[in-house]
Amino acid sequence: MDVNFKMLATTSFGLEGVLADELRNLGAQKVTEGVRSVSFFGDKGFMYKANLSLRTAIRILKPINEFKIFDEVDLTKSLQKIKWEDYLSVDGTFSINAVVNSKFFTTNSHYISLKSKDAIADYFRHKYHKRPNVDIQEPDLKIHVHIQHDNLTVSIDSSGDSLHKRGYRTATNIAPINEVLAAGMVLLSGYDGNSHFIDPMCGSGTILIEAAMIAHHIPANINRKSFAFEKWADFDADLYELIKQALLKKIRSNNYKIIGYDKAPSAVLKAQDNIENANLIDFITVEQRNFFETEKQVDGPTTLLFNPPYGERLQIETAAFYKQIGDTLKHHYPDTTVWFITSDFEGLKHVGLKTSKKIPLKNGDLDCKFVRYDMYAGTKKINN
């Protein structure tokens, strides 16, 4: 039986708690939240499961060594203490990613990447008179060098491409929302498939797809073609397939509706293409409709979650746009829990409804708020 080891899952700002919950629910041990990351323990099989299943992880790193370092000489000596042939063939390829936050290193991360590359190449050259090549695009091994104060952590990347690259999205709209952020918002909203779900400004359909995968217990990265760990020397193909099949058996049916609207015909076509690529065409309906001309067409509790245009994408006057959002919700969407993300904090003031929750998030480099409004059914008063 494989021994448990420490791993680190990276994520976006504001999603650390969601990722920690995901890991605990999967069965991870010693889960600890960090800044844009969560550390945990598990065995090789759990590493496979985490890559396949986690919706809010960007990548899963496996730390292989830690050192105390104070200068570039220490960096080189430390890297050359690692038995690299255990992870990489002399005929293989590798890439280096470095993150530096230390008063001992005034150079930038790119320079540290180059120094680390030279140290590893020299390790092989001195020992085998030959060295592996660097391949930035598709390396056999992705190495992460993280320097925090006087601590060097060397990790290998089990994911490869960022885990937001699910494998279903071939068509995108203007400023598409990241799959990890989309899934994080759905999970933060509390949606679990036990109510209807609507994205009234669905763009290329990312939020709808992530919601459907959550509702039906479909592993987040089941459509990916590959993970970095498949190139590792200790890759266990039988174990991987066993875990994959076990996850697929947990997929469930669901009778609640998942609906998307967009007023742009091109966006609707892109969304439909992506939904088909994700094999979710039977579970999601997308229509060309202007949200401001719609009303709720499903009975019962509903989650309405969307990413309205903001900043340069918003071609109309901000105050009028956000007031129209509030008016549409107030008059046409009773018995609905509404969530949307925006970086337009001034625009939020014009919605005209009282928020019941505000969560700070990042959409790329933009500081955003993920806000909730509770629209009551019947005669219950709506707070203005």
Image (cartoon, rainbow, N blue to C red):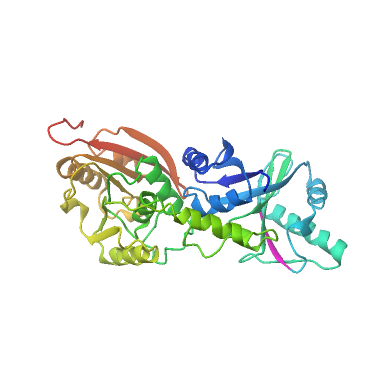
| Snapshot quadrant of residue 153 | top right
Using the image, determine if residue 308 lies above or below residue 151: below
The picture places residue 140, in percent across and down from the top left corner, at 67, 64
Q: Main secondary structure of the magenta part?
A: strand
Using the image, determine if residue 35 lies above or below residue 176: above
The picture places residue 297, in percent across and down from the top left corner, at 17, 50
Q: Nearer the viewer, residue 63 or 369?
A: 63
Report the residue that reaches farthest toward the left.
Answer: 379
The picture places residue 382, in percent across and down from the top left corner, at 18, 32
Residue drawn at the location 81% of the way across and 53% of the way down: 80
| Snapshot quadrant of residue 178 | bottom left
The picture places residue 149, in percent across and down from the top left corner, at 70, 38
Is 5 left, or right, of 10 in this rendering?
A: right
Can you say which quadrant of the picture contains the C terminus? top left
User: Is 292 covered by the magenta stretch?
Assistant: no
- Say whether residue 161 is visible: no
Magenta region, residue range: 92-97
